[in-house]
Image (tube, grey):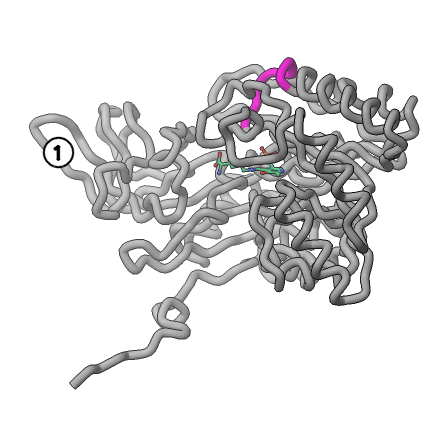
């Protein structure tokens, strides 16, 4: 990658680098540390061993430079749309290392994936199985498929991001899985290659993964008895990160749950981590716009809002805050950090005790996953800039959106 800006490499520390980015790129800005992503990738790769595959969940952060970096490290990719597939390919990714998840794949997306020759479709319903078969027949291709099963385990995470319980829309119930595989053997132009499951995100314990694995293995054995032999088992993503002082299992212990058992059966292990690769590699730099004291509390209004990072508003997520630069000489005071968006849910962090003035700079931590990826133009706010850093240098990976970018494709309809 071409790093355009290099600042005082000899003396630079992280804070100075963030400060330089704030000065030169402006705020709000997401900053991703590629070295940290490399470290997480290597931890996974070392524990995975040869022959197994890490498919990074693109939905966590689909910035092209981040994807490019993961391509260079050797990653495969887990995608959930044609758009994500095109991003992966634009970043130089190999479709043969791509698995395609998601409960609703359109004909156009299926055809694109078939044309590009992806590794596997993770199929979530009989209806989808039939649809993929039809498209494969039409294109004269064979579609590699894997059934995503729903093992009905409680991932013990936020209900919005639990996906492996029977009342979730995801996957095929265990007791219907065999029938679904049998259907796959009957439909044309399908090749069964694996089984898949993903039970949720931000898991902080290993037990739910172990439970899911046990159920998946039982199915693998049942399939083998029916003469259906698989190449791989995809255990999805979901390993959490510490947003506060949670104790998280390490990557090696997580992979140890599956690795030897699958190796002994000659099955490839696939995992689809997102957050645990990129989450703590991202910070959001923001500036204090104004300070507002009410009878109830002190509100510190920032130039970042729920349109940049939806997680606090959507899940009540708590992101660590630190002060990057402050000119305030007064003692710290209790305050609530909020954004300018017209919603009371637009709170960046509650119950803070900080000494702040207008113009001060803050960091919102651990926003590398599902931060920019879930951002929007709500309140006609341009999307923030994205910057990547490696070593002591940074480059703008995605420019801040302009007003014209936001108007793209819109027409001024005038009915007179
Ligand atoms: N594979 C599949 C099929 C998934 O649905 C997901 C995430 C992953 C892999 C990656 O999971 P991870 O390793 O990142 O936990 N927006 C929410 C998280 C939604 C996760 C959706 N699926 C958040 O901000 O917490």
Is 321 in front, or is 318?
318
Label 1 environment density (alpha carbons within 10 Å; few <14, some 14–19, many ≥20)? few
- Check disc 1 and report its element: helix, strand or loop: strand
What residue appears at the point 50 percent right and 17 percent down from the top-left corner?
A: 245
Q: Is residue 49 left or right of 28 when viewed as pictured?
A: right
Verify whether residue 303 appears in magenta.
no
What residue appears at the point 60 percent right and 28 percent down from the top-left corner?
A: 199
Verify whether residue 203 appears in magenta.
yes
Q: Is residue 281 left or right of 381 when viewed as pictured?
A: right
Q: Position of residue 373 (x, y in %)?
A: 50, 48
- Residue extending farthest bottom: 416
Secondary structure mostly taken by the magenta-highlighted segment of the chain: loop
Is 331 in front, or is 72?
72
What residue appears at the point 70 percent right and 61 percent down from the top-left corner?
A: 135
In which quadrant of this rendering is ligand 1 seen?
top right
Q: In this figure, which residue is indicated by the disc labeled 1?
A: 293
Q: Is residue 245 above or below residue 112?
A: above
Q: Is residue 136 left or right of 315 when viewed as pictured?
A: right
The quadrant of the image that shows the C terminus is bottom left
**Residue 131 figure quarter:** bottom right
Residue 172 in sight here? yes
Q: Which region is colored magenta?
A: 202-208
Q: Position of residue 165 (x, y in %)?
A: 54, 24
């Amino acid at each position: 990658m071409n790093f355009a800006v290099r600042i005082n490499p000899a003396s630079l520390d992280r804070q100075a680098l963030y400060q330089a980015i704030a000065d030169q790129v402006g705020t709000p800005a997401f900053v991703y540390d590629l070295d940290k992503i490399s470290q997480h990738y290597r931890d996974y790769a070392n524990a995975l061993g040869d022959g197994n595959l890490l498919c990074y969940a693109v939905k966590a952060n689909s910035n092209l430079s981040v994807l490019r970096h993961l391509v260079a490290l050797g990653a495969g990719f887990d995608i959930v749309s044609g758009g994500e597939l095109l991003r992966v390919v634009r970043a130089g990714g190999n479709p043969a290392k791509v698995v395609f998840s998601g409960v609703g794949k359109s004909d156009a997306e299926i055809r694109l994936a078939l044309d590009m020759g992806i590794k596997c479709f993770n199929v979530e319903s009989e209806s989808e199985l039939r649809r993929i078969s039809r498209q494969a027949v039409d294109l004269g291709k064979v579609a590699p498929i894997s059934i995503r099963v729903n093992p009905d385990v409680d991932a013990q995470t936020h209900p919005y991001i639990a996906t492996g319980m029977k009342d979730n829309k995801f996957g095929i119930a265990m007791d219907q899985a065999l029938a679904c595989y049998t259907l796959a053997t009957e439909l044309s132009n399908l090749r069964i290659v694996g089984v898949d499951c993903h039970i949720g995100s931000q898991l902080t314990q290993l037990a739910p993964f172990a439970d899911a694995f046990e159920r998946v293995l039982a199915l693998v054995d049942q399939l083998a008895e029916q003469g259906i032999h698989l190449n791989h088992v995809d255990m999805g993503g979901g390993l959490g990160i510490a947003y506060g002082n949670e104790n998280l299992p390490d990557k090696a212990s997580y992979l140890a749950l599956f690795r030897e058992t699958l190796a002994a059966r000659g099955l490839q292990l696939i995992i689809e981590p997102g957050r645990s690769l990129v989450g703590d590699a991202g910070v959001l730099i923001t500036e204090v716009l104004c300070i507002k004291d009410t009878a109830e509390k002190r509100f510190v209004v920032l130039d970042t809002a729920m349109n940049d990072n939806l997680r606090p508003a959507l899940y009540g997520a708590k992101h660590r805050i630190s002060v990057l630069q402050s000119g305030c000489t007064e003692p710290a005071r209790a305050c609530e950090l909020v954004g300018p968006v017209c919603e009371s849910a637009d709170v960046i962090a509650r119950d803070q005790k900080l000494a702040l003035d207008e113009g001060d700079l803050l960091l919102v931590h651990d926003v590398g996953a599902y931060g920019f990826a879930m951002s929007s133009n709500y309140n006609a706010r341009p999307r923030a800039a994205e910057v990547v850093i490696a070593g002591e240098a940074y480059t703008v990976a995605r420019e801040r959106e302009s007003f014209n970018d936001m108007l793209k494709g819109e027409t001024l309809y005038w009915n007179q």
